[in-house]
Image (tube, helix red, strand yellow):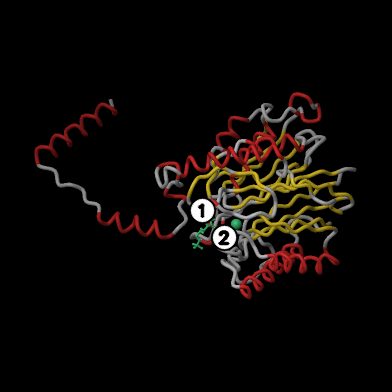
Amino acid sequence: MRITLSCIKADVGAIGGHIKPSVRLTETVEQFVKEKAKKLLLSYRISTAGDDVAILMAHERGIDDREIHQLAWDAFLEGTRVAKEQGLYGAGQDLLKDSFSGNVKGLGPGSCEMEFEERPNEPFLLFAADKTNPGAFNLPLYLAFADPMYCAGFLLSPKMAKGFTFTIMDVNHTEGDRVIELNAPEELYDIACLLRDNERFVIESIRSRGTGEIGAVVSTSRLHNIAGTYTGKDDPVALVRTQGAFPATGEVLSPYRIGHYVAGTMRGSHNGPLMPVKQNGAISFFDGPPIVTGAALCVHGGKFTEAVDVFDHPFWDWVRNNVAQKAAEIRMQGFSGPAMLPFAELEYGGVVEKMGQLDRRFVVREEKGAERHARAGAATRTKRAIQA
Ligand code: F6R
Ligand code: MG
Ligand code: MG
């Protein structure tokens, strides 16, 4: 059976700041999806990560289907209605456009979708992150799908011997989708060269080179680029098929033990370590740390099993303690250097305006005649030396 998995998520309002949606909001979204599911879906599941609501759907309509995207958009409008009624903070925050135009891409919500022929048993993972951006998945997916230090399958499984093709998007290019396909393992250094820059180059999808099958997809939208100004971080979602020709579930999870530093946390303007947390939880320290939740499911005939919360295990308590320490360490240096994002990535208008005002107050000191002559002479000599 050929099915499509679609995950569409948005922040449409939260209790007590950008913390967590209300139960009524989440239930309203769920009720709406349940009603529409009768006609359109084989299965669905609603979950939350920080202040975001994620709608996971299985259906037979393919990716970029208008009705599926409309369903999610309308569900988030319903959620926004409740958020306004309850006076939740940031009601409708991620619905950046007034009307739906066929696809949620470019309208605010994040989405990732994959279409495939269902295996007799089809395990997969849904990751939902909050207070960070899509590049947060670059490192964990690279390590799981390209690095034998994290994925033992490259040594032990003939099914994975041919490696994977990475499709990477330049998310700074706003006029259209600018993408490149690179093959692991031959082009590992090129892949690393791009994935180093989490703000600009983002893994969009990964395919098996052995079977040609889709293995992973990530939402790639950047709210900053859509709105042209700060509107919250992009809080990405990712779907990853596991086992068989793909890395095992535990191999896909293993890189989350690092708690690597990603952009996001307070006001979307800082670096903080990505903390793997249980599902449906809240945001706390310094509007962070950036979090990632993980749900493992099987889908059969388009029907989901119940989800297993993959980060709800004693091992991850130990990881969380370490990651908390990393968060505290970087926070100790406040605004200084790598604790905050570079200027080009700062999303709050305030700092941009402030820099503009300060720029006008800078002066270039008048130099005395002799000094100016000496400097001009030195510059000319350097130029001649270079030309020679
Ligand atoms: C980051 C985030 C929060 C807010 C912060 C200020 O993605 O959502 O850190 O940026 O709480 O929020 P406002 O500007 O809405 O008061
Ligand atoms: Mg928010
Ligand atoms: Mg969010």
Image coordinates of residue 193 in percent, x first then y, are: 55, 34
Question: How many angstroms separate mark 2 from mark 1 (CA)?
Answer: 11 Å
Most foreground residue, 75 or 307: 307
Image coordinates of residue 211 in percent, x first then y, are: 80, 36
Q: Which mark is residue 18?
A: 2
Mark count: 2
Most foreground residue, 89 or 358: 89
- The residue at 68%/62% (across/down) is 103
- The residue at 75%/55% (across/down) is 6
Q: Looking at the image, is mark 2 or mark 1 nearer the viewer?
A: 2
Q: Is residue 111 above or below residue 164?
A: below
- Please tell me in which quadrant of the rendered image residue 77 appears: bottom right
Q: Which quadrant of the render holds ligand 2?
A: bottom right
- Please tell me in which quadrant of the rendered image residue 386 appears: top left
In the image, taking residue 248 as reference, residue 287 lies left or right, namely left
Q: Which mark is residue 41?
A: none
Mark 2 Cβ inside 8 Å of ligand 1 = yes
Image coordinates of residue 198 in percent, x first then y, are: 55, 43
Q: Is residue 247 above or below residue 280?
A: above
Mark 1 Cβ inside 8 Å of ligand 1 = yes
Q: Amino acid at mark 2?
A: His
Q: Which mark is residue 268?
A: 1
Give the mark nearest the N terminus, 2 or 1. 2
User: Badge 2 local density, few (<14 within 10 Å), some, or many (20+)?
Assistant: many
Q: Secondary structure at mark 2?
A: loop
